[in-house]
Amino acid sequence: MYEPRDYRSLFKGAELVYFDVCVDETDLRIGADKNLYSEAHDCVRKCRKKLKAYIRSNPEFLTSLEPLEPGTDAPAVAARMCRAARKASVGPMAAVAGAIAEEVGFELLRYSSEVIVENGGDIFIKTGMPRKVGIYAGKSPLSGRIALEITPDMTPMGVCTSSGTVGHSLSFGNADAAVALSRDAALADAAATAAGNIVKSAADIEKALHFALNIEGVTGAVIIIGDRMGASGNVRFAKL
């Protein structure tokens, strides 16, 4: 059985150097051509500082479960979260992990040709070779047995997961894993949350997939609940 952080054993790839970056609640596992800890840490710190300052003047940004328009003082990362949340019909914080992963990912691409940033199950990836991303779905018998194949032509992209049974993130559904793929990692995060909210039972899998794929910019989705799974869009599976 997997412990809470064991999903990171499913997050790996050849020919990259892996390192962790933690700043307060942000806990990243990063793969790159070389160790870029200092650059990544500085980026996370600056990103969090901007978001915290914006939240102080716009506290509803932190608590709203509905989309919000970005204020005139919104930093770029907050504005991206608002845009993603509006497309998925959720609150802006539903996109925060994907947005930070993407912010760090694009910063590190200045120094590395390939970058993978994992932030609590939400991933930004730019790869030059096919890679596998395993799906962790808690106590589901499918957990750790399924992987998505991500090819260079699909990247940079976000592969984000929401769960109603794993972790502390807010979900109103019961999905063991709701995965969304998008070129926009913030949107993938928001879409995964929105799709996961729909899944109360296996009967909702098709409805959730339909919802996710009708969000502009979402290219694929996977839903797992118990021993049932559904997938739609540009989703490629591979053996772990």
Image (tube, rainbow, N blue to C red):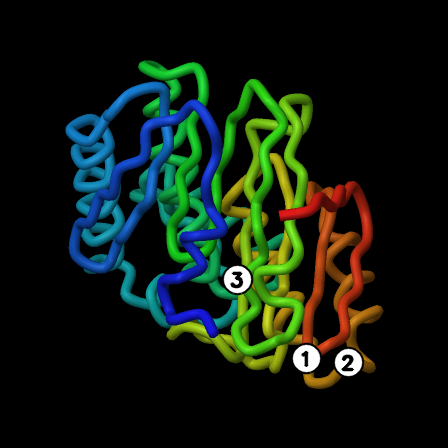
Left of 84 or right of it: where is 21? left
Instruction: Give the spatial CA distance, label 1 vs label 2.
Output: 8 Å
Viewer-nearest of labels 1 and 2? 1
* Mark 2 element type: helix
Residue drawn at x 63%, y 64% as measured from the top left? 178
* Mark 1 element type: loop
What label sits on residue 202 in the rendered view?
2
Chain-order first, disc 1 or disc 3: 3
Amino acid on which disc 3 is placed: Pro
Left of 47 or right of it: where is 15? right
Task: Indicate the position of residue 28 as horizontal and vertical percent values.
Answer: 31, 47
Whether tag 2 and tag 3 are in contact, CB under 8 A, the answer is no
Q: Which of 201 and 82 is in front in this view?
A: 201
Chain-order first, disc 1 or disc 2: 2
Whether tag 1 and tag 3 are in contact, CB under 8 A, the answer is no
Dot 1 alpha-carbon crowd within 10 angstroms: few under 14, some 14 to 19, many 20 or more: some
Q: Quadrant of residue 7?
A: bottom left
Viewer-nearest of labels 2 and 3? 2
Task: Indicate the position of residue 92 as horizontal and vertical percent values.
Answer: 45, 58
Residue drawn at x 19%, y 38% as measured from the top left? 46
Dot 3 alpha-carbon crowd within 10 angstroms: few under 14, some 14 to 19, many 20 or more: many
Whether tag 1 and tag 2 are in contact, CB under 8 A, the answer is yes
Q: Nearer the viewer, residue 141 or 168?
A: 141
Dot 2 alpha-carbon crowd within 10 angstroms: few under 14, some 14 to 19, many 20 or more: some
Q: Which of 219 and 81 is in front in this view?
A: 219
Instruction: Give the spatial CA distance, label 1 vs label 3.
Output: 30 Å
Q: Which residue is denoted by mark 3 in the rendering?
A: 67
Left of 12 or right of it: where is 38? left
Q: Which residue is denoted by mark 1 in the rendering?
A: 226
Amino acid on which disc 2 is placed: Ala
Residue drawn at x 37%, y 36% as measured from the top left? 76
